[in-house]
Amino acid sequence: MAEHVTSARSGRTAKTLAWLPLIALAIFILTPQLSSLTYSFFRGDGSFTTEGLTGLADSGAIVAPLLRSLVIASLTVVVLIATLVPAVVAVHLWAPRLRPLLSILCTLPLVVPAIAIVAGLTTVLRGLASQGRGSLGMQVNTLLQSQDLPLVLVGTYVVLCLPFTYRSIDAALSTLPLRTLYESSSVLGAGMRTTLRRVVVPNIRGSVMFSAFFTFALSIAEYTVAATLSINTLPVYLNTLSSTNFRGSITLSVLLNLTTWLLLAAATLSASQFGQRAESAPEAEPDAQTDPAAASAAGLSPAAETAARAASPASAAPAAPDSPRKEAQTP
Amino acid sequence: MSTTAQTSAHAPRGDRASASDREPMSVRFQDVRKSYDSTEVLRDFSIDIEAGSMVSLLGPSGCGKTTTLRILAGFEEVNGGDVLVGGRSVLSLPPHRRDMGMVFQSYSLFPNLSVADNIEYGLRIRKVDAGARRRRTEELLEVCGLAGMGSRYPHQLSGGQQQRVALARALATQPTVLLLDEPLSALDAAVRSSLRDEIRRVQQALGTTTVFITHDQGEALAIADRVAVMNSGRIEQYDAPHSVYARPGTAFTARFVGSINEFAVSPAWAPGAPLPIAADGAEVVFIRPEDLAITPQEEGFLQVKGQTYTGERTMIRLGRPGEEDAPWSASLASAQAGTVPPGTRVSATVTADPALRLPRAEAGGAWA
């Protein structure tokens, strides 16, 4: 009897201990955020202020970088999905032997630091520019680095997102009987585009959604590449702002962080939700393997991980089952 | 007045009927050659499939039957020869322009679409309007025994039901040719035979030219108007099912379709004469087990080695006395199987013309 109690107690202790690293991690991540948030809205003497926010709105200088970042992020999502999905499908269907190669190619950006990519890019761009005023190289250079629509960033972000999005889409496709689906669809009169739209994409919806959210989050918050190429995106503006309106820059960073977190949480959620829906279908498990991809993605940015983990204990809190019991005891 | 009403009432149905009464099309393979790397899969393969008929391609795995079907569907290119549907070459057309229907062994329904949407898929691509699509789908659900299941999803259906949906989906567009790639192989025995009969019924009702691929000879014989027995890229025999069974054209067909007994005999031997079992005759006769009558006899030249009960009939396995092998078999009504328990010496006579009689040199197999 006593032993039972001890073992039960030690089990409970172990459970509590298991939460410790998580709590520590949460503190580690949340503390700077909370202090940023506090700093944004409270002066040193403790009085409430919105001058951070109003300062941002008043100057109006935020509009251009914000729009630029939104356009870049959206375009990156479109380009990534529109090229990656058909490419992975094509490799699965017609060149399965190239799969390892594609996998390595798509993973490479992970091992090359962003700063190295920029260094390479700068060299190429400088090479183009060195062809002189009015030359084709110069025109390409200008086109790529245009402040209105810096295509060079779109391209770079597509590449930077590949390791995560490729894994997710490749895993989802592997769980589909892609060949027979494609063949059934062809015999019924569908060309490749129709097959992609009506059959393939709907069956890997979860991982496509994940890829879209993830790409958007990464490209709207990316700093290194944009700053090095001196393109004034939102994160770059935020950094500039810190010298003139420090409180404003902190407020902005909190907002940006929040947006990114929400996007990554949406990515994780959409992946797992569609995965769950598919699990109820024994034949159709398009996204069963999306979760590991989501987890690895979270590894890049601790934000998603925390968001995902923070969400689960909260929703699992036994508050709801408790209340009826209390009600029962009242009379 | 009444005539007008009648006409208008008939209009939609007439429309539909004319669509499903589409002229059936013949299929012809002309000296088709196909090889993968250095392996020849089809060698001067030719076959004529009559419009509206159902043909089984029957053969062991690797005989080229699946390749034949995939060439017809447009998934494989040929190295030579021509493939004609309704008299026109289809080789230059990609799969999605060939207007065929195909049912796969693995069902291959679109998991994201409901049963009705699966069936409508081909019609949607052909931009058939919603009303006509719905009517056609209802009709096919009915025909394929799926009434009321239109809103379900593939994962909610049994294997047999999924394959019915696949059949309905393939038929929805009124294909010129229906291709069935071992559609029953993934199903269990009971469902298999009922769906087999159903496929045949639907095919006959619609009159669609159909090619049915199988490695199961029972299936091939039961379902088709004609059976093409294939072996290493060639047609061994192309004939009505009963002819393929009763009058096999080659030793391969004789051995592949049904079970068969082989005896070496002298050229003078005729049915009714005693069967020699010496292995030195100049000719080989192929005899079906049901054509071999056995009677217990102490001096009999055969010995019963065992019995296999199959219900109505029992297979009696026979061999030479004193040997373990049982190279022959006789089929007996199960009620009589008790008269020849294992170990019994028996004599055997042939009660019908042999299915096939070949010079020993051509018999191949163990005789080579």
Image (spheres, coloured by chain):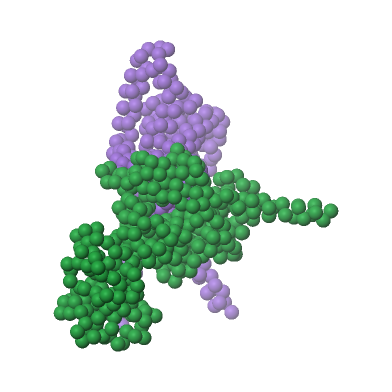
Chain colours: A purple, B green
- In this view, which residue lies farthest toward the front? B268
x%, y% of residue A276? 45, 58
Instruction: Judge whether residue A238 can be spotted in this image.
Output: no
The residue shown at (37%, 31%) is A225
x%, y% of residue B150? 58, 60
Relative to B38, residue A320 above or below = below
- In this view, which residue lies farthest toward the top? A133
The residue shown at (84%, 53%) is B1
How many numbered marks have been drawn onto this rendered protein structure? 0
Relative to B257, residue B208 above or below = above
The residue shown at (48%, 57%) is B54
Q: Quadrant of the C terminus of chain B?
A: bottom left
A199 to the left or right of B149? left
The residue shown at (51%, 65%) is B198
x%, y% of residue B285? 27, 67
B210 to the left or right of A164? right
Relative to A312, residue B313 above or below = below
Which quarter of the picture shows residue B44?
Answer: top left
| Foreground of the two, A120 or B61 | B61
- In this view, which residue lies farthest toward the left? B322
x%, y% of residue B162? 49, 61
| Foreground of the two, B101 or A231 | B101
Instruction: Judge whether residue B129 can be spotted in this image.
Output: yes
| Foreground of the two, B133 or B102 | B102
| Foreground of the two, A98 or B335 | B335
